[in-house]
């Protein structure tokens, strides 16, 4: 299945009305599909794998905003540091330190979201809400002047149970508002939550940025 143009237009209209940003998740999808969505006006794309992102960035238009949404290993930050627009999954201080270092090398400030562990599954990465607040309260973010923490990101449990999803999104939204009031920073404005199956609910719970793949590009062959 290739690009779902009508779905894109419908989703875009809903998101624009709600003032929510769309990251089109293009992992595993060919450059032609990304170019086709670009031609419809989409500029923000999300990828999970460093090598795939590096290859796509080299081949596709330079005004694309590339979002890294996967689990990022510290030793791979250097490959995306020159161009990445927003790193969604920052889940520890070691990674913050490395992003800061690579940002300095590239003479830029790299925007990031702190990932919060909201799902019941063990496999999802992220800070838990108490270690997140501890990091904020400690003032240690100022050790990373070339990292701009723009908000939070979370992934809900892999379930269709709306009550569970609502509860997890509410928890993340609460953390977002707490951190926002503590930081008192105008740049802290991004809450990345919601994917193809749960974005409507995520928006109701305060999402400002959704990451949507399969509704736009069709189902993926691999389970990722
Ligand atoms: C793959 C992925 C998405 C998009 O998932 P869809 O269900 O295809 O919309 C969103 N966020 C993350 C972190 C992902 O890995």
Image (cartoon, grey):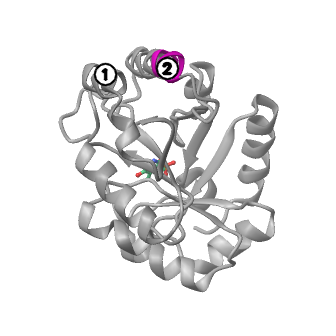
> Predominant secondary structure in magenta?
helix
Percent coordinates x, y for residue 112 in the rendering: 47, 47
Tell me where the magenta segment starts and ends, as one range: 177-183
**Residue in view at x 59 percent, y 79 percent:** 31
Residue that protrudes farthest toward the bottom in the picture: 59
Which label lies toward us, 1 or 2?
Answer: 1
Counting other residues with Cα less than 10 Å from the Cα at mark 1, is it few (<14), some (14-19), or many (20 or more)?
some
Percent coordinates x, y for residue 219 in the rendering: 49, 58
Percent coordinates x, y for residue 81 in the rendering: 45, 67
Q: Badge 1 is on which residue?
A: 129
- The quadrant holding residue 155 is top left
Q: Is residue 200 left or right of residue 169?
A: right
Upstream in sequence: badge 1 or badge 2: 1
Q: Quadrant of the C terminus?
A: bottom left
* Residue 167 among magenta residues: no
Q: Any mark on residue 196, and which? A: none
**Residue in view at x 30 percent, y 52 percent:** 97
Q: How many numbered discs, if any?
A: 2
- State the residue in front, 187 or 5: 187
For label 2, being within 8 Å of ligand 1 is answered no
Q: Badge 2 is on which residue?
A: 173
**Looking at the image, is 49 positioned above or below residue 32?**
above
**Residue in view at x 53 percent, y 78 percent:** 56
**Residue in view at x 63 percent, y 80 percent:** 60
């Amino acid at each position: 299945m290739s690009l779902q143009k009508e779905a894109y237009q419908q989703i875009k209209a809903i998101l624009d009305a709600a003032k929510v940003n769309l990251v089109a998740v293009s992992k595993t999808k060919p450059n032609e599909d990304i170019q086709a969505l670009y031609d419809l006006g989409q500029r923000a794309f999300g990828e999970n794998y460093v090598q795939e992102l590096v290859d796509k960035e080299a081949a596709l238009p330079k005004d694309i905003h590339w979002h890294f949404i996967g689990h990022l290993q510290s030793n791979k930050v250097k490959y995306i540091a020159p161009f990445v627009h927003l790193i969604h999954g920052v889940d520890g201080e070691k990674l913050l330190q490395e992003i800061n270092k690579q940002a300095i090398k590239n003479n830029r400030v790299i925007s990031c979201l702190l990932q919060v562990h909201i799902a019941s599954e063990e496999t999802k990465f992220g800070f838990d809400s108490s270690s997140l607040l501890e990091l904020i309260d400690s003032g240690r973010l100022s050790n990373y002047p070339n990292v701009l923490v723009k908000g939070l990101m979370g992934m809900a449990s892999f379930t269709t149970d709306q009550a569970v999803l609502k509860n997890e999104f509410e928890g993340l939204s609460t953390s977002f508002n707490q951190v926002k009031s503590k930081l008192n920073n105008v740049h802290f404005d991004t809450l990345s939550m919601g994917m193809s199956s749960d974005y409507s609910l995520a928006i109701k719970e305060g999402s400002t940025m959704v990451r949507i793949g399969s509704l736009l590009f069709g189902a993926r062959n691999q389970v990722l």
